[in-house]
């Protein structure tokens, strides 16, 4: 069973999709398409690349294109963060980790990277979850080594007060700040970090916030940061038969932006039942695009 989990568009219009390849034993799977939708034969094996990071189950969940054209994919490598960097032709970049791949353990065990963001200085930020119910964030130098200036050893985990379950899903970078979004006990959750990996106290008082849409289940899946510093989180809200796309926009200090849908929050219900926004992006004209899934019976897992 093959499935795409993330997509990135190169400056030349070619499209890179990343996800899972294979059933049973699974691998990172990447495919690159020309702008006309045909597989790009100059990438890997007729447009496709498969990567085995461990002897267990591997899956790419996020992908980004560096300014030099190299491709970074992140995901799960067994029970660790897994990263792979490819040259533009799809071959491994040996500068990264010695063989093009890196895996990272956290002190609390059982991790998976769900998203990736690139800093202007070439550093790579991967975010996801540690299975002891923490946001997990790692920052890497351009050569794939952990960046010791971030959290002391390149790794940071974050809990939320009173939370039994904190799951990080998406990451964004603006300037020297890192923003991670996810869910905490059925609410949108967000944490912002300073460049050294500490929580940013100028954001919601202690660097963390949660947002409730409904008494039911709310979860942020992705984040985009506008040029003016406002933060847009997208995901789902509601349980039962009518979950909806949910978006929230925040000011730079973490307060909801009242100029966005009157109270900073917006929900969108489609005609077919359960709806979930998986991704969000900001257009050059400032308009916000959210994409995901909709369908009666819930064709996605939470």
Image (spheres, grey):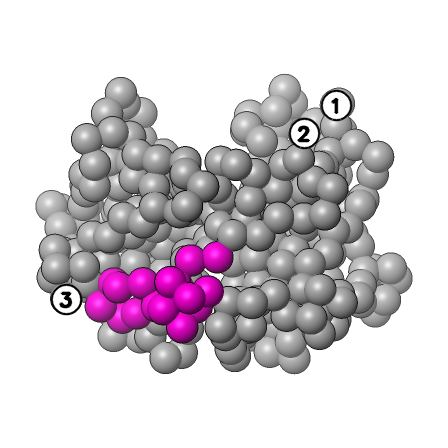
Front of the two marks 1 and 3: 3
Give the structural element (helix, strand or loop) at label 1: loop
Name above or below for residue 39 compared with residue 293: below
Q: CA distance from mark 3 to mark 2?
A: 44 Å
Is 53 left, or right, of 291 in this rendering? Answer: left
Which residue extends farthest right? 262
Q: Nearer the viewer, residue 36 or 169?
A: 169
CB under 8 Å between callouts 1 and 2? yes
> Distance from label 1 to label 2 (Cα)?
6 Å
Overall secondary structure of the magenta section: loop
Residue at left 35%, top 35%? 79
Q: Residues within 10 Å of mark 1 (few under 14, many from 20)?
A: few
> Which residue is found at the position 52% from the left and 63% from the top?
172
Among numbered discs 1 and 3, the one appearing first in the sequence: 3
Q: Which residue is mark 2?
A: 274
Q: Is residue 74 left or right of residue 167?
A: left
Per the model, the C-alpha gap separating discs 1 and 3 is 49 Å
Q: Quadrant of residue 237?
A: top right
Q: Which residue is mark 1?
A: 241
Q: Residue at x 56, y 72 (%)?
A: 194
Mark 1–mark 3 CB contact (< 8 Å): no
Sequence-wise, which precedes: disc 1 or disc 2?
A: 1
**Residue 221 versus residue 104: which sits nearer the camera?**
104
Numbered range of the magenta stretch:
139-156
> Can residue 214 be seen in this snapshot?
yes
Taking the magenta stretch, the answer to whether it contains residue 55 is no
Q: Residue at x 34, y 41 (%)?
A: 80
**Secondary structure state at the residue bearing disc 2:** strand
Residue 86 visible (yes or no): no
Residue ID for mark 3? 95
């Amino acid at each position: 069973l093959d499935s795409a989990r993330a997509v990135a568009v190169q400056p030349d219009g070619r499209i890179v999709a990343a996800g899972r390849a294979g059933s049973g034993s699974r691998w990172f799977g990447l495919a690159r398409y020309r702008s006309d939708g045909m597989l790009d034969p100059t990438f890997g094996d007729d447009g496709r690349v498969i990567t085995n990071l461990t002897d267990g189950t591997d899956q790419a969940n996020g992908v980004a294109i560096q300014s030099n054209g190299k491709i970074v994919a992140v995901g799960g490598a067994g029970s660790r963060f897994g990263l792979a960097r490819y040259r533009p032709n799809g071959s491994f970049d040996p500068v990264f980790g010695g063989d093009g791949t890196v895996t990272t353990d956290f002190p609390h065990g059982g991790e998976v990277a769900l998203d990736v963001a690139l800093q202007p200085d070439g550093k790579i930020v991967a975010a996801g979850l540690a299975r002891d119910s923490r946001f997990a964030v790692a920052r890497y130098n351009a050569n794939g080594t952990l960046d010791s200036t971030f959290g002391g050893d390149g790794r940071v985990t974050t809990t939320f007060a009173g939370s039994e379950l904190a799951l990080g899903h998406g990451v964004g970078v603006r300037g020297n700040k890192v923003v991670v979004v996810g869910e905490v006990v059925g609410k949108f959750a967000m944490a912002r970090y300073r460049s050294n990996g500490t929580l940013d106290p100028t954001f919601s008082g202690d660097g963390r916030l949660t947002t409730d849409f409904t008494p039911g289940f709310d979860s942020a899946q992705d984040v985009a940061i506008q040029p003016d510093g406002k933060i847009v989180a997208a995901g789902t809200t509601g349980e039962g038969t009518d979950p909806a796309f949910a978006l929230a926009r925040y000011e730079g200090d973490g307060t909801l932006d009242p100029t966005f849908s009157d109270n900073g929050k917006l929900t969108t219900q489609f005609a077919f039942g359960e709806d979930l926004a998986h991704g969000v992006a900001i257009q050059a004209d400032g308009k916000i695009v959210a994409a995901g899934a909709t369908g009666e019976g819930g064709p996605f897992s939470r």
